[in-house]
Image (cartoon, rainbow, N blue to C red):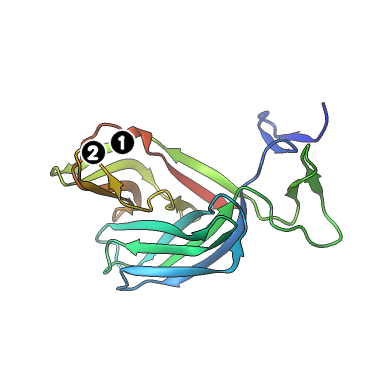
Amino acid sequence: MFGLRVTNNSGVVQVSSEKPYMSLHAEGYQAIGSTYRTTITFAQPCTTTQPPIIFIRAERGSQSEQTSFKCGVTGSPGNWTGFVLINGNTTQVNYLYWFAAVWRPLTASGNYGMRIRDANGEVCFHASSQLIKFSRVITAWTELYNDGFVATFGSGIIISSDEYMMASHCHTSMVSCYGGIQHIGVTLDADGQVMITFTGHVTTSGVGYLPVLLAKKS
């Protein structure tokens, strides 16, 4: 046995030399308005092999309708440059707050703080990284609307003012088993309930396997 492991009062491991940590790569806010497609570029490219995970939170001008988003990361392994956001309701959103997170610490800098290396000598944690924590994982969905071509499923979970929805898993069109094209988006209703929306030939089978993660910045 070697390394460091720190647990909280509930016995949950919070810091260790064995597990990667999700840390902040970039953040910002973007005026959306009536724009359908928005491209956001990071100030510095993300050099990880795996793409960064994008989380969003919408600031709406009107609370009377739902908002829906698709999101796709741009770039390639080792050079992720930003993401593209598709806004499904161009009359509702004023600003979009966002952050990109990666499963590794940012480049360590400074002459003080704590730095932890894993068994391979790679830095897996350092005190200057801003860590991201998952606040809730939503896996239970109730069908609210389905006409065979568009379907909306509600979670009953109201997003809080400091939470963000993971959106980068709602990135591209999907070819369904019926031979058509399906799209998926994360959605908020007028009360801030987290939902998912499908377009294309829709059935309820398998929707429970699509989790939506909510996260907070530390």
Q: Quadrant of the N terminus?
A: top right
Image coords of residue 131 (percent x, y) = 64, 51
> Element under label 1?
helix
Mark 1 to mark 2 CA distance (whole Å):
10 Å
Residue 218 visible in the shown view: no
Residue contact between numbered discs 1 and 2, judged by CB atoms under 8 Å = yes
Taking depth in this image into account, of 144 and 51 the one nearest to the observer is 51
Q: Crowding near pointer 1: few (<14 within 10 Å), some, many (20+)?
A: some
For label 2, the residue is 143
Image coords of residue 20 (percent x, y) = 66, 42
Mark positioned earlier in the residue sequence (1 or 2) = 2
Taking depth in this image into account, of 120 and 189 the one nearest to the observer is 120
For label 1, the residue is 207
Image coords of residue 115 (percent x, y) = 80, 49
Image coords of residue 181 (percent x, y) = 23, 48
Residue 8 is left or right of residue 142, and the answer is right
> Element under label 2?
strand
Q: Which amino acid does label 1 sit on?
A: Val
- Residue under the point 52% across and 58% down: 76
Q: Which mark is residue 189?
A: none
Residue 120 is left or right of residue 19, and the answer is right
